[in-house]
Image (spheres, grey):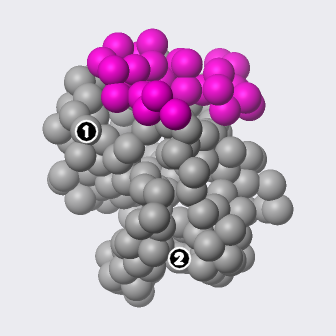
């Protein structure tokens, strides 16, 4: 049985500037700024994007430039590449694509969406400790316009029409309705 798409949420104002999105996240998660790097990380985005055969959204790249991997509310893990360890991040994404996401697709639980690299395919960027997946729907040539897609372990799928960083900010500040997810405590833990 295919689970249904709960719906699509849109931000009141879509943030298109990556630094503005990070500012919104830092306001929503006050402890986050404590973990901001003093110098921007130099990451091999060419390796990562070549390995995925797609560019990645600028807000996510900017977040990775300034922050290490972190958890929100001991629930949501935002996995970010680390300098010199990009291949581990890439392997993790590939494992997700080959494992859980592919299994969902084969079980017809993905509301018709396929895993990346299929056209418009799902590409993971975060996960919860409950098995929820936070993905991009890679539709279109402009990663800044990709939808965030949430795949709840409870079977609820939904879209958000903003970037990943804005999604995190609005999920933590309560602006966003957390359909099929528990409320997220804006406490941050570095990982």
Number of disc labels: 2
Q: Is residue 29 magenta?
A: yes
Measuring from the top left, give residue 184's x and y in whole percent: 27, 29
> 24 or 118, which lies in front?
24
* The magenta segment: 12-39
- The residue that appears at 40% across and 84% down in the rendered structure is 98
Q: Quadrant of residue 30?
A: top left
> 110 or 69, which lies in front?
69
Say above or below: 25 vs 99: above
Q: Is residue 167 visible?
A: no
Q: Which residue is mark 1?
A: 190
Q: Quadrant of the N terminus?
A: bottom left
- The residue that appears at 32% across and 54% down in the rendered structure is 127
The overriding secondary structure of the stretch rendered in magenta is helix
Horizontal side of residue 143 vs 83, given as left or right: right
**Is the residue marked by circle 1 packed among few (<14), some (14-19), or many (20+) residues within 10 Å?**
few
Q: Furthest-front residue in view?
A: 39
> 9 or 68, which lies in front?
68
Measuring from the top left, give residue 55's x and y in whole percent: 71, 63
Give the mark, 2 or 1, whose residue is nearer the N terminus: 2
**Is the residue marked by circle 2 packed among few (<14), some (14-19), or many (20+) residues within 10 Å?**
many
Q: Which mark is residue 115?
A: 2
């Amino acid at each position: 049985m295919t689970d249904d798409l709960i719906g699509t949420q849109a931000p009141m104002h879509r943030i298109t500037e990556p630094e503005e999105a990070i500012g919104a996240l830092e306001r929503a998660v006050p402890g986050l700024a404590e973990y901001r790097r003093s110098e921007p990380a130099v990451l091999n985005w060419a390796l990562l994007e070549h390995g995925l055969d797609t560019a990645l959204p600028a807000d996510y790249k900017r977040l990775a430039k300034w922050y290490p991997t972190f958890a929100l509310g001991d629930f949501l893990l935002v996995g970010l590449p680390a300098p010199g360890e990009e291949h581990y991040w890439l392997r993790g994404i590939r494992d997700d694509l080959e494992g859980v996401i592919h299994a969902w697709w084969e079980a017809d639980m993905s509301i018709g969406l396929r895993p990346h690299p299929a056209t418009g395919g799902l590409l993971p960027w975060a996960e919860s400790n409950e098995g929820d997946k936070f993905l991009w729907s890679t539709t279109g040539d402009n990663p800044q316009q990709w939808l965030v897609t949430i795949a709840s372990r409870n079977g609820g799928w939904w879209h958000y029409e903003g970037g990943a960083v804005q999604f995190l900010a609005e999920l933590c500040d309560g602006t966003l309705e957390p359909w099929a997810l528990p409320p997220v405590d804006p406490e941050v833990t570095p990982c």
